[in-house]
Image (cartoon, helix red, strand yellow):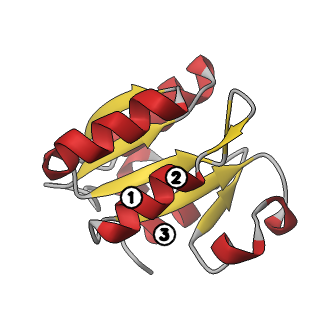
Amino acid sequence: MTVEDRGAVLTGRRILVVEDDYLVAQALCAVLEDAGATVVGPIGWLDEALDFVTTQGDRFDAAVLDVNLHGEKSYPIADRLRALNIHFVFTTGYGADALDATYQHYPRCEKPFNEQVLLQALNGN
């Protein structure tokens, strides 16, 4: 997907990025910014991200969560986002079975990202 194809599908949206791989985070941020979003983060550690969501959940309206953050699952962050009614998309380098059964019904994008699928998932499509 080119920048022209992406247009500004996320204009006005503030997207939290929780990703522990620096290069993946940078690429993801570029995709989101090219789509018109304001990126919050990235944050790469479970405890930091959970604290941020807990104390500053009003600073963003959607999130992209890497399932595995330095060997810890991001499920506590997902639970907090759900409690705050904030839309999120899981990302993983593994298949659907990488998610615990409780979380398999949430939107998920596999790495490497299909940008169009990611943007559609963030828009709730």
Residue 22 placement (x, y as % from top left): 57, 18
Residue 69's label in the rendered image is none
Q: How packed is label 1: few (under 14 Cα within 10 Å), some, or many (20 or more)?
A: some
Name which of mark 3 and mark 2 comes first in the sequence. 2
Q: Which residue is drawn at 69% across and 37% down?
A: 72
Report helix, strand or loop for mark 1.
helix
Question: What is the C-alpha distance between the residues marked 3 and 2?
Answer: 20 Å
Residue 121 percent location from the top left of the image: 48, 69
Q: Which amino acid does label 1 sit on?
A: Arg
Q: Name the residue under label 1.
A: 80
Q: Work out which quarter of the rendered image holds the C terminus and state it.
A: bottom left
Element type where label 2 sits in the image: helix
Q: Judge whether residue 87 can be spotted in this image.
A: yes
Q: For the residue marked with disc 3, what is the amino acid?
A: Ala
**Quarter location, residue 106:** bottom right
Label 2, on which residue? 76
Residue 30 visible at all? no
Q: Where is residue 79 in the image (x, y as percent from the top left)?
A: 46, 62
Q: Which of 70 and 13 is in front in this view?
A: 70
Left or right: where 27 falls relative to 71 = left
Q: Which mark is residue 121?
A: 3
Q: Which dot, 1 or 3, sits closer to the camera?
A: 1
Q: Which residue lies furthest to the top in this view?
A: 22
The Cα–Cα distance between marks 1 and 2, rounded to whole angstroms, is: 6 Å
Question: Which amino acid does the dot numbered 2 rest on?
Answer: Pro
**Which residue occupies the foreground of this view, 88 or 6?**
88
